[in-house]
Image (tube, grey):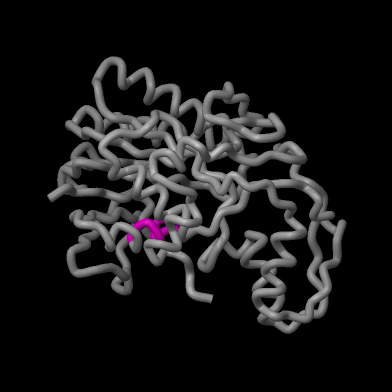
Amino acid sequence: MTKVAVTGASGFVGRYVLAALANTDVAIVAHARTPRAERPGPASLCWSHFDLAAAPEDCFERLDRPDIVIHLAWDGLPNFTAPRHFENELPAQSHFLRGLIESGLRRLVVVGTCLEYGMQSGCLSEDMTALPASPYGLAKDALRRELHFTSTLMPFDLRWLRLFYLCGRGQAPTSLYAQFHDAIARGEKKFAMSPGDQVRDFLEVEEAAGAIVDVALAPKAPRILNICSGQPTTVRSLVERWRAQAAADIELKLGVHSYPAYEPFAFWGDNSRLNALRGGTVAARAVSEGRRATR
């Protein structure tokens, strides 16, 4: 049986990836920094606990020598502009992943970010040159380049997944999704946000997790893949959709917050590679497999 290890498994995306893996015929090893008695999961799942910032030399053994590692762990988020991403996190990540590769890991699936594209606008395809404009994007792209070079010296199957904007239950309290739904729960009459006309690519986390698992388990896959909906959507229309779904009587107070300086005004992902690998659109595949959240 194929053994899949998931780092950062207790995080926002990690919990959904574990749920998606539970529907497949694989053995699962979940990694988190610290143990907790209440960690959920099927009976076939086992946990391994250690700090990636000081990864032990036997980390591959602690993950039970997996065939595939889905690497989600990354500290310091959601502060995308902190220098610690390339000062601290990048060397720690490099040391940890190189240790797995040198120990015999055959397939490494790493979650990157759409911020690797930097300030480029419009539809972003994997063939475009990465031009990161934030410390987080810079650190992720540097790690990708290093792993690509390492694969020429110690051959292994590297799959790099650039996540666009995910949303869903369990997201960080500072996220737009969490702030909006918390405002509704508190009975607030107004919700302060940006002008809302900036264009992004949003994907529900359940669908993204399903895509990550499909890419990880596919016999062959492109080296770089966008994990996205492929649909340009304004932030305002997204929030209005949430409001309609919640049947909430809350006014959107537009223009209170400014646009992030490290993002272009309008960009979204090209998901044609992902669709080709999965045999259909992300949304259609997710619905057919029962991965869409119950509303």
Q: Quadrant of residue 217?
A: top left
- Range of the magenta residues? 11-18
Q: 228 or 190: nearer the eye?
A: 228
Report the residue that reaches farthest toward the bottom: 187
Expressed as whole percent of the image width and height from the top left, the position of residue 252 reads 82, 68
Q: Is residue 115 found left or right of 220 in the rendered image?
A: right
Q: Is residue 261 found left or right of 41 in the rendered image?
A: right
Expressed as whole percent of the image width and height from the top left, the position of residue 215 reads 36, 43
Expressed as whole percent of the image width and height from the top left, the position of residue 200 reads 68, 47
How many discs mark residues in the rendered view? 0
Expressed as whole percent of the image width and height from the top left, the position of residue 251 reads 83, 73
Does 168 appear above or below 132? below
Please name the predominant secondary structure of the magenta segment in the image.
Answer: helix
Q: Quadrant of residue 255?
A: bottom right
Q: Is residue 292 found left or right of 102 in the rendered image?
A: right
Q: Is residue 226 found left or right of 231 in the rendered image?
A: left
Q: Any magenta on residue 17? A: yes
From where the camera sits, is residue 89 visible? no
Q: 213 or 139: nearer the eye?
A: 213
Residue at 30 percent of width and 63 percent of height: 35
Q: Any magenta on residue 123? A: no
From where the camera sits, is residue 116 visible? yes
Q: 9 or 36: nearer the eye?
A: 9
Residue at 63 percent of width and 47 percent of height: 231
